[in-house]
Image: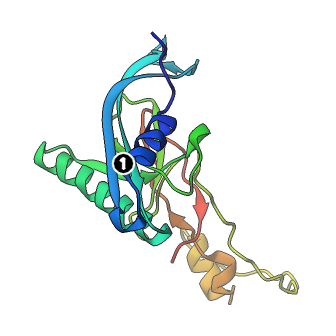
Amino acid sequence: MVLAMTHEEVVASLAASEVHSWRQLPKLVYHVQLKFRDDPRPRAGLIRAREFTMKDAYSLDRDEAGLDVQYQRLHRAYETIFERCHLPVTAVAADVGMMGGLAAHEFMYLSPFGEDTVVLCSSCGYAQNRQVARAAKPVITREVPLPLERVATPGPALSSISATSSGCPRSARQRPCSWRPRTVGSCWPSCAVTCN
């Protein structure tokens, strides 16, 4: 038996024999079958199984806009499945992998025993797998340094109070957005990313 990594060729052959006009589109073809991946990434201390059962879905559309609509429908269908199963998952942007494409999402169940890391921000809704997460440094304008002077700070002074009273500009003391990277595994240190 030969196991394939994907089945685009079979779907293309099927479409060629069944679809004779663009008026017959869109179509959605899906199937459940054994797949093969030569992936040595360890999972739970073991080498990942190379054979596994997977559901594939192939969208045949007239244009890219149709593909986007179908992608959103499938995305919503998965959300509905997880809701009905009472599984609180988070959809995160993921690596498209060797199959390629413009976008991919993974539905992650957050657990302290997992083995993947996701980066989440409750302020702006950012949700991505660590493999594709991007961070942008805040733009800081250079300022002319002022001459040093002694400032009285009686009692336990906080740096923020000192900065405020000394006229330190807000841009120089701005705190970054607290990305709350959640790990499906271990904790990631806070990221210095501004997303106000």
Instruction: Examine the rendering and report whether any part of residue 188 can be seen.
Output: yes
Q: Which is nearer the eye, 105 or 72?
A: 72
Q: Find numbered disc 1 in the image and state the secondary structure of the residue it sits on.
A: helix
Q: How is the image coloured?
A: rainbow
Q: Which amino acid type is shown beneath numbered disc 1?
A: Glu
Q: Which residue is drawn at 42% across and 52% down?
A: 92
Above or below, comparing residue 53 to residue 16 in the picture: above
Above or below, comparing residue 21 to residue 5 in the picture: below
Q: Which residue is drawn at 58% across and 18% down?
A: 40
Q: Is residue 108 left or right of residue 151?
A: left
Judged from this view, the residue extending furthest toward the bottom is 167
Residue 152: quadrant of the picture: bottom right
Above or below, comparing residue 13 to residue 40 in the picture: below
In the picture, which quadrant includes the N terminus? top left
Instruction: Examine the rendering and report whether any part of residue 109 can be seen.
Output: no
Q: Which residue is drawn at 68% across and 90% down?
A: 167
> Dot 1 corresponds to which residue?
18
Q: Which is nearer the eye, 61 or 89?
A: 61
Residue 54: quadrant of the picture: top left
Q: How many marks?
A: 1
Return the x and y of residue 145 as percentages of the image width and height: 87, 83
Return the x and y of residue 95 as percentages of the image width and height: 55, 46
Return the x and y of residue 37 as percentages of the image width and height: 53, 22
